[in-house]
Image (spheres, rainbow, N blue to C red):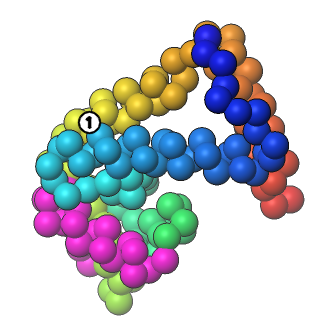
Amino acid sequence: MTEPSSVPTSFGLLMRQVGDGLVRQLDATMAEEGLGIGFTHYVGLKVLVNMAPCTAAELGQAINQVPSAVTRLLDRLEALGAVRREPHAQDRRALQIVVTDDGRALWQQLKVRGDRIMDLALRDLDEAERDHLFSLLTRVRDSLSPP
């Protein structure tokens, strides 16, 4: 196990640094695909594979992005053939986002890269430590959730 480079003085700062590190690593590995995609596309496609069909507003809420960012995200994924915008089944004024077969295949490709980054992030922890970390972070997350 490696020694930390500095002892964090703030829980919030440490969480930010971990998040920033993951985003930086995921952006770098997504760029290697040569598709003009990054972390946000990775997260967006991950969510879509699990919840589509859905509306752009539902996607935006799930990934905490403003409508203009969701539009750019969907434009890129649509240009790659990963998603389609179709008329909504229940609301003729709305569109729903559908993941294509190519989109599912792309997700499998990106997931391999993402899994490698997660393994990199957790490489110095044994299985018990990983389980404990997940347990603690789940409790912190739940403490911050609305009642």
Q: Residue 125's spot in the image, x, y percent?
A: 61, 15
Give the extent of the magenta segment: 66-89
Residue 69 magenta-highlighted: yes
In the image, residue 101 sits, relative to residue 115, either above or below, namely below
Q: Residue 66's spot in the image, x, y percent?
A: 49, 77
Q: Is residue 83 visible?
A: no
Residue 96 magenta-highlighted: no
Mark 1 neighbour class, 10 Å CA radius: few under 14, some 14 to 19, many 20 or more: few
Quarter of the image containing the N terminus? top right
Q: Amino acid at mark 1?
A: Gln
In the image, residue 105 sits, relative to residue 41, either above or below, namely above
In the image, residue 10 sits, relative to residue 116, either above or below, namely below
Query: Which residue lies at the image location 20% right of the left edge and 42% below the top edge?
Result: 32
Quarter of the image containing the C terminus? bottom right
Lateral position of residue 27 relative to residue 81, left or right? right
Query: Which residue lies at the image location 14% right of the left edge and 49% below the top edge?
Result: 34
Lateral position of residue 140 relative to residue 40, left or right? right
Q: Residue 62's spot in the image, x, y percent?
A: 53, 61
In depth, the one of 11 and 49 nearer the eye is: 11
Label 1, secondary structure: give it. Answer: helix
Image quadrant of residue 129? top right
Query: Which residue lies at the image location 36% right of the left edge and 83% below the top edge?
Result: 94
Image quadrant of residue 71? bottom left
Q: Is residue 86 visible?
A: yes
Lateral position of residue 108 relative to residue 3, left or right? left
Query: Which residue lies at the image location 57% right of the left edge and 47% below the top edge?
Result: 19
Image quadrant of residue 3? top right
In the displayed image of the protein, which residue is found farthest to the bottom? 93
**Which residue, given by chain and number where applicable, does mark 1 sit on?**
108
Lateral position of residue 127 relative to residue 11, left or right? left
Q: Residue 114's spot in the image, x, y percent?
A: 37, 36
